[in-house]
Amino acid sequence: MCGIIGIIGKDAVAEKLLAALRRLEYRGYDSAGIATLVDGGIERRRAEGKLDNLEKRLAREPIAGRTGIGHTRWATHGVPNEKNAHPHATDRVAVVHNGIIENFQDLSEELVAAGRRLASDTDTEVVAHLITRYLEEGDEPARATKRALARLEGAFALGIVFAGRDDLMIAARRGSPLAIGIGAGEMYLGSDALALAPLTNKILYLEDGDWAVMTSKGVTVYDAEGREIRRKVRKTAVSGAAVGKGGYRHFMLKEIYEQPQVIGDTLHSFVNPATRAVTLPEFPFDPAKATRITLIACGTSFYACLVAKYWLERLARVPVEVDIASEFRYRGADMPEGGLAVFISQSGETADTLAALRYANKQRQHTLSIVNVPESTIARESEAVLPTNAGPEVGVASTKAFTTQLTVLACLTLAIGRARGAITPDAEARLVGALTEVPARAAEVLNHDERLREIAEEVAKARDVLYLGRGTSYAIAMEGALKLKEISYIHAEGYAAGEMKHGPIALIDEGVPVIVIAPSDELFAKTASNIAEVMARGGRVIFLSDAKGVQRLGWQAAATVQLPEVDPFVAPILYAIPVQLLAYHTAVIKGTDVDRPRNLAKSVTVE
Ligand code: G6P
């Protein structure tokens, strides 16, 4: 996590660094800082907490310099205070870092024994001191950095500047993502294309093990073996302009409301409304021939996998495994030849998902990624990519990325099912028809916003909340619980409704709202029995269903939200929206920082 930025500019750079950090703040907000090169020395401003604190500090104590680096932190080693905020510096070198230097204890002991004084509790500071030591031994910056890099274990993206060398910056990447941007007489580095978006659209991505020497005139990249290497310069389509709240109080709310539009944009890439057929881009392999599909992701993206498991097994008749990336990567599972591994990630940078992808590549699986950032590392290292066209998602709690992931997975299911003969052309036409209606139905769901806000008043008083569902609604129950705990800090659990009597039913009393996700599908009657069991024990049911469901059961619930009646196939996409809104309003009522909830970060690039 952590976001880093670097600029070799033509004029004062502090404000540009700050603006770039705003676009990176989703990666962490425990502290922030910048360092610039001024009069042969290094100037730093750092502040604990969110970027606003650094901004205030800079207003009080401005900082000159045309070359500088900046950082927004998600703390790993060392508490989030000013002393541990990046950049870390000596009198000759300043460093920003995203990742973890695993051997920092050994290195700091060595440095302290050699008489150096470390000022922070971080793993990063050793990098500045190591490079300084080699500079003091007479090395030029590039050689000193190369020697230091050779000593580091772990994962990192680094930006390094050197006192008195205003036209020089060194970048290095092992594990954590890093992009270099090329401007007119200016050069940039950043954790992602979004950070660089308003500065340039010409970007090259460092590959694992690369390091690069940047000046205002250009960049020389070296690979892990030290050979000079060319990395492709790409034109990125990421627009800095797209990243604003657009009149909404929070990014999360804006992103929830964008769903009808972005689901439509995503469908547009894969669905022909005239023929009611799905067309996927050409893959270098045939996904329908996979003997088994393994779906892997983290967080909300994992729940998209879970929905897809039901779809792919049921409709496409293909065996499916789902796994959390951080568990999968260390299990050492054999993956039989002929398998397809699918990786789902909004950012395309999640460290565990990336490691799982590399494992699957080694296991000779075909690999497909479903990502929202097409230039991301996961996209680049997969054999095939299906993009979600959600646009930049800034709110830490994922919303539109989730529903567009589901949209892509629904299309993938139909394409595979049809090719395997499990879905007839008629069935495909019917299911595509249901999919193409989703944007309009999603807009209808948004009309229930006010009702969900009222219900949130009650949820906000609870200490624990239970979410129940069956089939694909079970996955949405878990996603709903995750959303609530992420942003409102209320303990919530998502459970398979049929499993409730094996444990969670013991929790039920009038203080525990039970949110039931129950579109009227073939499992409705079973869920209805579970609702009766909850109510018989005094539980207060918040019932999310459609007209049929409400007619059958709504009168018994403490609160009801009547959603549009849709084909059960697309219900999980639509039922994701009310659970997002419920979590959102609950968090607003509780007064938490909705877009930047405590301890979380949007892009988790450390294990
Ligand atoms: C973090 C975010 C979640 C996201 C998860 C996976 O935990 O806060 O919103 O679902 O990472 O991220 P990815 O980018 O791989 O989808």
Image (tube, rainbow, N blue to C red):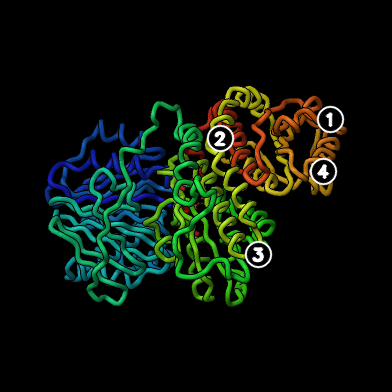
The reply to whether discs 1 and 2 touch (Cβ–Cβ < 8 Å) is: no
Task: Give, as a three-letter code, the residue at label 3.
Answer: Val
User: Which residue is located at x 64 percent, y 52 percent?
Assistant: 427
Task: Give, as a three-letter code, the residue at label 4.
Answer: Lys
User: Which residue is located at x 85 percent, y 39 percent?
Assistant: 529
Pointer 3 or 1: first along the chain: 3
Q: Which disc is residue 526 wearing?
A: 4
Q: Label 2, on which residue?
A: 442
Q: Label 1, on which residue?
A: 538
Pointer 4 or 1: first along the chain: 4
SS class, disc 2: helix
Give residue 113's position: percent from left, percent from top.
35, 68
Q: Nearer the viewer, mark 3 or mark 1?
A: 3
The front one of 476 and 595 is 476
Q: Label 3, on which residue?
A: 318
Q: Residues within 10 Å of mark 4 (few under 14, many from 20)?
A: some
Q: Measure the alpha-carbon separation of dots 4 and 3.
A: 25 Å
Q: Measure the alpha-carbon separation of dots 3 and 1.
A: 42 Å
Give residue 412's position: percent from left, percent from top.
55, 57
Q: Measure the alpha-carbon separation of dots 4 and 1.
A: 19 Å
Give the mark count: 4
Q: Which disc is residue 86 wearing?
A: none
User: Which residue is located at x 62 percent, y 36 percent?
Assistant: 579
User: Which residue is located at x 81 percent, y 27 percent?
Assistant: 556
Judge left or right: residue 437 versus residue 179.
Answer: right
The front one of 565 and 339 is 565
